[in-house]
């Protein structure tokens, strides 16, 4: 099938900070008016039961925060355009795969005085991809093993695009076991995120003069249990 859509989304306005890049902001504490983002998307979908895929092209335009004459405002503009691909299927009975990737061209399309115009925004990687897999273990009914690979490409930490975070890849694994307890389904889950204990900066965000970094979590073990009533 082929589809297309146009959407406008209303987002809350940001709060003007006290300073930005060492400059005192005259309208500090002011809550900016809500802004509207516009998105155009078109794509194709295929679902053959054991295999399916979606390919979509999109373009998103939204206001961007800038500082002009010590006044914080959302009079800048950011444009994102790209392609998103998702594929899923069951190549072998009991083995399920789903993966996706987004290739993004993002730029600061309107800036104060044209400074850094055309550069990439802070914290927007050009490529992101994931691959998830599950295997129902035939030797033990109710046991499913799963794994996930997550990739995030380089992303700039400043509007001048002088410094970028390295790309990173994370591997997660897990298992779940479902059994009957007093005629109720009890599911036990165990998971290890960041299996290789990779040290990485997961992302960056904010705006020029007030950006931040988010550290990726170290190897993390999780366990849980749930029961259906």
Image (spheres, helix red, strand yellow):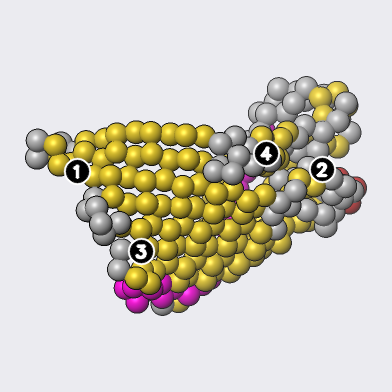
Specify whether 170 is left or right of 66: left
Foreground of the two, 27 or 89: 89
Mark nearer the N terminus (1 vs 2): 2
What whole-number distance in Å separates the C-alpha atoms at marks 1 and 2? 51 Å
Specify whether 223 is left or right of 54: left
Specify whether 177 is left or right of 169: left
Helix, strand or loop at mark 1 = strand
Magenta segment boundaries in residue numbering: 32-52
What whole-number distance in Å separates the C-alpha atoms at marks 1 and 4? 37 Å
Q: Residue sitting at 81 percent across and 38 percent down?
A: 208
Q: Is residue 91 visible?
A: yes
What whole-number distance in Å separates the C-alpha atoms at marks 3 and 4? 31 Å
> Which residue lies under the disc numbered 3?
95
> Which residue lies under the disc numbered 1?
179
User: Badge 2 local density, few (<14 within 10 Å), some, or many (20+)?
Assistant: many
State which mark lies toward you, 4 or 2: 4
Mark nearer the N terminus (3 vs 4): 3
Mark nearer the N terminus (4 vs 2): 2
- Looking at the image, residue 127 lies above or below residue 93: above
Helix, strand or loop at mark 2 = loop
- Which quarter of the rendered picture does the C terminus lie within? top left
What whole-number distance in Å separates the C-alpha atoms at marks 1 and 3? 20 Å
Image disc number at residue 158: 2
């Amino acid at each position: 099938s082929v589809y297309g859509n146009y959407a406008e989304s209303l987002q809350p306005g940001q709060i003007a900070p006290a300073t930005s890049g060492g400059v005192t902001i005259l309208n500090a504490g002011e809550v900016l008016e809500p802004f509207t983002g516009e998105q155009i998307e078109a794509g194709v979908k295929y679902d053959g039961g054991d295999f399916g895929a979606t390919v979509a092209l999109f373009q998103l335009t939204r206001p961007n925060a800038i500082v002009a004459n010590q006044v914080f405002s959302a009079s800048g503009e950011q444009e994102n355009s790209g392609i998103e691909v998702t594929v899923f299927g069951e190549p072998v009975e009991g083995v399920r795969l789903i993966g996706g990737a987004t290739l993004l061209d993002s730029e600061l399309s309107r800036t104060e005085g044209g400074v850094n115009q055309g550069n990439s925004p802070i914290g927007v990687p050009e490529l992101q991809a994931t691959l998830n897999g599950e295997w129902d273990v035939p030797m033990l009914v109710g046991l499913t093993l799963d794994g996930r690979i997550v990739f995030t490409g380089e992303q700039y930490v400043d509007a001048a695009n002088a410094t970028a975070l390295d790309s990173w890849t994370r591997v997660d694994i897990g298992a779940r076991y479902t059994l009957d307890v007093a005629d109720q389904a009890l599911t036990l889950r165990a998971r290890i995120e960041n299996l290789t204990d990779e040290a990485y900066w997961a992302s960056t965000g904010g705006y020029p003069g007030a950006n931040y970094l988010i550290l990726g979590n170290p190897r993390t073990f999780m366990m849980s249990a749930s029961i259906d009533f």
